[in-house]
Amino acid sequence: MRKFKVSIGMAACLCLGIAMAVSAPLAAAKADYPDKHVTVIVAWGAGGGTDLLTRAIQPILSKNLGADIVVKNLPGAAGTIGTAQAARAKPDGYTVLIGPAGPVTTQPHLRDIPYDLDSFDPVGRIAINVMVTMSTKESKYKTLNDIIEGAKANPNTIRCASSGAGTLPHIAILALNKAAGIQLKHLPYKGSSNAVKALLGGEADVFSDQAQIIPRYDLHAIASWSAERLPDYPNVPTMKELGYDFQIANWNGMFVPRGTPETVIDTLTTALEKTLADKAVLDEMAKLKVDISYLDPQAFKTFAEGDYVRNRELLKEAGLVK
Amino acid sequence: MEQISAAIAAAVMPGTLLAMLVGTVFGVIVGALPGLGSVLAITIALPFTFGMDTVPAIALVLAIYCSSVYGGSISAILINTPGTPQSAATMLDGFPMTKQGKVDYAIGWATTASVFGGIFSTVILIIMAPQLARFALRFNSIETFALISLSLTCIAGVSRGTILKGVIAGLVGIFLATVGTDPMTGTVRFDFGVFELTGGFKLIPAVVGLFAFGEVFSRVSKRHDASQQVDMNVGFRVAPLREWLLRWKTLVRSAVIGTFVGILPGTGASTASFIAYSETKRAGRFKEKLGTGEPEGLIASETSNNAVTGGALVPTLALGIPGDAVTAVMMSALIIQGIQPGVRLFEDNPETMNAAFVALIICNIMLFAVGALLAPLITRVLRIPEPILLALVMILSVVGSYGVSGAVFDVFVSLFFGVGAFLFRLCGVPIAPIVIGLVLGPIFEESLRQGLLITDGDFLAFFDPREHVIAFVLMLLTVAIIAFSTWREIGAAMRKKKEAT
């Protein structure tokens, strides 16, 4: 009997101990977050678009968050290596992912990846860059009609470059195929700059990518995949005006591993929103030609899920979903 | 004239000169450490450029670029381990020279050759960037395929005498390069369920394993004999002019090869140095002695890989299309400064670009001075007792392969390649062809499959001289080289047989 009592006492102590051990860091996380440096994972090499964006907001975000921020570049396999690392991290708010649409809305459909969009809790959307379909100034394809007519007359002959299978430029080709009922020939290249080179060298006829590359390579814009005409290109029609209601954009957002305490997400969201309204950040973004476009966690979640579902459908019809 | 003096004035400001000096010293050291290549060196410096003025920022990045490519040659010569993949061909003659105790001359040859290559290509860049950029655009998938086929014949050049083993090693390299994501469909190949392999083997951990680990393992496996140690002339010595005059053709030829290969996006300095080396093996004055510590081999490799720097800037600046990861990071450095590379770069920013060109020339001259000053210090490494030296190489290599992307997995990749390289060396299989296969394999496959998409699967259409004249000529050259080397090998075998009987 006495033995039993002791063991009850011990069990109680043990339970209490476990409860304290479990709750103590949680309570601490709530009250003191952040009390050490925060690591931001960028799943691309230094100097890439996402990296430049992250480093541009880093100092101000660090000030608003009240903690040092370390940017960790983990490139490889179309951004999935670093993104997987972020998904595996402890959900305590000290590991954060800043990343574009590809690794979370297209890659999970293409192959076995140890994460999915719902492995993350969204913190906020940072920026958005609308896709624009373009050709060269010397090209015979100057309007969307030129492309559709040409493809109807000779299916599978108009060469459309992309920056790789399953990338957003590829999604744009698939979307156009579906919307207009045509067959375009897909030429995948390694990365956007090789695709642009193919376009300039005459190997490819059409390429869709972010608007910021139009002035750099002196290209001809055919149509933009946005709801409204772009302020910088008032003469370029939108796909919607042309009768194809598709909107495609690349974006960058901040995520944390799923299961991160809500108060921690709130702290991060507040700091992010404040950062994106900062004048120094806006100036820096103007230099990088990135359009800031903040969305709160709930709106961002709905938005990203919309992209995820649409991309899955398009890739499935193209026979690319695993 | 006024423009030139304004550009010089902007480039010789004390702040700019200081930026270049810091960049050059930093680049040489990072380049010399195995695994820490040009990309990492520039990446480390990138955040510092945020707060700098435009010209000093560009000068800093350019200085790091040139000097890190050169720095790789130092460790190649000293410890038979290239600091960067670009210097893999430098070992072939650099290390034998060290073994003969002529390390001071070897560093002298390599430094002078690098400076010549760098300045030669800078001059070409200044004079004809827009025209060359237009030429680069004519190199589409099919032309690239033909050029890579030609480059693959280098395998014969770096493995003469053991040509069959060389070809096997080259094929091993190409097969290893197919691991990872299929470039056309996005499907994953040969990952054996290991998620980290879905991106394929990264080049730097692989090269660190093949050379640094491979070298350490094979030295450890041999009995250490202190009495055999050669008396080292540490220091820095440039060979007399008459020695240079004997080899001037190789100097110029390698500079041209390096600049040309640099201009074509997607190839890079490792390819250039192997092509230049095997060209020298075919046409050099001392071709018979190549591979035994002949300075001509050093000249070929080092002139061409530094000549790539100016060449690679042609498409990066004039088209806004970076050819490799290094120039991509450099392009970001410009964009951070608010300068958009591309067709309008020279019109929009004439002063800045002129100053950058002057800075590029000064960087190369500074490279010589820094090389001459650092060499006496660095070559002392050879006086460190071998066990300690090998331990240091191991530590630096682990750090180097981890540092590429901060993944422990890459360290295991290095170890795997190191053990493989050790076994290959035991069997007398040359290692350099594996690197050639690893570097060229992905471009070979990608350009072949893109070309087949374009011609609707018709391989013969690649060689239609009406459509693809450049590809046609390159393929003819490839066939001629293969026929020539086969014929020579057979001839040598016949003679041997005759002598035996």
Image: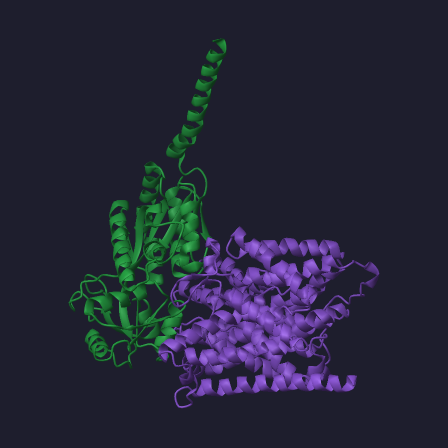
**In this image, B149 relative to A279: left or right?**
right
The picture quadrant where one finds residue B98 is: bottom right
Residue at image coords 58%, 86%? B483
Q: How many marks?
A: 0
Vertical arrangement, residue A13 with respect to residue B370, above or below: above
Residue that lies at the very extreme toward the right in this rendered image: B227
The picture quadrant where one finds residue B184 is: bottom left
**In this image, A14 relative to B368: left or right?**
left
The colour one sees for chain A in the rendered image is green
**In this image, B354 relative to B253: left or right?**
left
Residue at image coords 44%, 49%? A85
Where residue A244 appears, as percent x and y from the top left, is: 18, 66
Where residue A32 appears, as percent x and y from the top left, is: 40, 34
In the picture, the quarter occupied by the C terminus of chain B is: bottom right
**In this image, A22 relative to A278: left or right?**
right
Where residue B3 appears, as percent x and y from the top left, is: 45, 79
Is residue A100 visible in the rendered image? The answer is: yes
Is residue B286 visible in the rendered image? The answer is: no
Q: Nearer the viewer, residue B58 or B121?
A: B121
The colour one sees for chain B in the rendered image is purple
Residue at image coords 78%, 58%? B223
Q: Nearer the viewer, residue B116 or B411?
A: B411
Where residue B99 appears, as percent x and y from the top left, is: 75, 68
Q: Nearer the viewer, residue A171 or A200?
A: A171
Vertical arrangement, residue B194 with respect to residue A2, above or below: below
Which color scheme is applied? by chain
Q: Nearer the viewer, residue B96 or A186?
A: A186
